Image (spheres, rainbow, N blue to C red):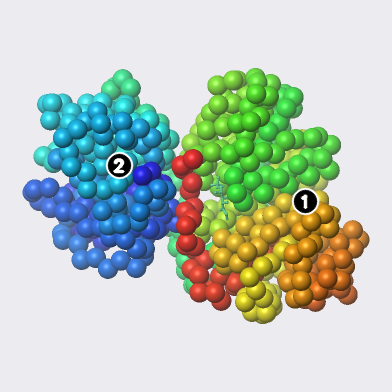
Amino acid sequence: MGVMCGVFAVSAESRTDAGELTLQGLRRLEYRGYDSWGFAVRGSDGPATITKDVGKISEADIAFPSSGEVISHSRWATHGGVTQANAHPHRVGRVTLVHNGICENYAALKQAFPGHEYVSETDTEVIARVIDHYLGQGMGPVAAIRQAVEQIEGRYAVVCFIDGQAGIYAARRGSPLIIGRNETETYIASDIPAFLTETNVVNYLDDDEMVHIVGGKAEYFNLTTGASVQKRDIAVQWQYEQAEKGDFAHFMIKEITEQKDTLKAAIDHTDTELNRAVNLLRECNGAYFIACGTAHKAAMVAEYFFAEVSRRKVNIVAASEMKYFQQFVNDRTAMIAVSQSGETADTLEELQKAQTKGAKILSLTNVVSSSMARMSDVHLPINAGPEQAVASTKAATAQMALLLLLAYAESGRTNEGRELLHTVAGNVNDMINPRYEEHIAEIAKSIVERENLFIIGRGALAPMAYEAAIKIQEVSYIHAQGFAAGELKHGPIALITDGVPVIVLGDDLETISNATELKARGAHLIGVSAQRDDIFDEWIRVPDCGTAQCIASIIPVQILSYHLAVLRGVDPDKPRNLAKSVTVK
Ligand code: F6R
């Protein structure tokens, strides 16, 4: 069934090592999916040879024949089993194809285009079948692909070889495809790190466009009209090294450590850039912040930031719940999307709905070329650099830092916000060091056998308690739950028994009083705060950061989650069942 995956293809006429090159690039996209993988390698003649299997691409050992053209895919299954047959590429007739997205009407298409014995349970094989059908009717490749994808309902990025036709074809609607190019080689990938070792010159394929690449040439077409499209070359700023692990054991800990620098980068925006966002907010009389998962928890702190700093009530809604509130969206509404990838389907779809009603779109994303960034009236990049670990860490704190600066900018106190955040960045820089990490690793050892863990916080630290739970759950598989500190006594306190660990974010009087109630029932309290309180059994210091306390306080919990994962033998970069960029609904 539908997949949201990593796609990487290379056309390099003068090279013979395209297989190895694609393997390395696909490994850099592994965060997008790691159930199974596959390659189609084109030799000098005949159809492409397909090699595919279940398992992680990082662990695959493949001997590639000499080739200059390869299509590859790393899969994250939504429905349908993780089997070799379901792994991509899929081949039907003359067409060898990989797909990212979901073909919602695949069953109807199968009926409409009979005459093929399906070997997989995917929604992908039928796309190859439909393209092959039109080729069989005598259409050229561009026409056949246009005819076929026009009938797909849902989001997709497809990349294919066609027997007897030089080069590689790709088309997109809703799932990212980026073209990288140098003089003799062209790449098509779901994300830039795949080809950053080879080039930083890119073209972005837009929705309803397709591309045909051969060697160093790329030709673009509009899928609806068939007209040729001209693209501007863009040199991306990301460095290849940024997307590598370096001396770190995992991307997750590398990215946690990078928060020494990323907070400063996040607020590196001129007054003019911030004012465009502020004007958009001021001209609207309702504001909805939408996001998913960790980005949603980061957006939730904006409610507290705007209340405290600019005395404005804003709405924060999980994007998957926004449809119930779309009735209130009109041409006076500001929709603010918070997203690392800028491609998350739930968020993107609600933005699109709002945009058709005339709402103004402001987005804060990490990927500047993303669909959200490009559809926005105003876009503010969060400047965190490539985030590869599935669990979001540096992007989340960058989002919060920029949201706080935005609240200050809206209240006309941009410089005050900048000063505060520069101090916070400096404090975080001092805080993250090997001794600090060792201390947290020791605490991880003391709770690693526990099955349940709770986190509490108040004010902007309440969303951080929810975020802490996400971090711990997703990489260590320990059952963790976050609560607003005051809510515990209204039910969840029944779960507290002797020795149950509770992480207490903050040291204000009310939180301590809530923590005391838990301690009285046997809880093992781990304080994460500026001041040590006597009731804490263990304590992790965070610097006093005022309004920005939530930003600094989540970092030790990220470190704790990382160590819990490592201690429990989980690969924190690739926890089970997850994928980084959730481009399906
Ligand atoms: C968890 C995590 C996810 C993402 C969510 C939204 O650590 O990373 O919960 O935050 O899938 O993704 P983006 O930010 O790309 O929209």
Q: Which residue is mark 1?
A: 460
Left or right relative to 487: residue 161: left
Give percent across and percent down for residue 427: 74, 63
Residue at left offset 38%, top offset 43% = 2
The reply, left or right, for residue 439 in relation to residue 153 is: right
Determine which quarter of the picture holds residue 198. bottom left
Mark 2 sits near ligand 1, with its Cβ under 8 Å away: no
Which residue appears at 59% of the width and 20% of the height? Answer: 357
Callout 1 crowding tier (Cα within 10 Å): few <14, some 14–19, many ≥20: many
- Look at the image and tell me whether residue 353 can be seen: yes
How far across and how far down the image is residue 59, in percent?
A: 34, 68
Residue at far left of view: 45
Which SS class for mark 2? loop
Q: Quadrant of the N terminus?
A: top left
For label 1, the SS is loop
Residue at which label 2 appears: 124
The image position of residue 579, as x and y in percent, is 47, 53
- Residue drawn at (79%, 56%), measured in percent from left and top? 491
Depicted 164 relative to depicted 566: above or below: above
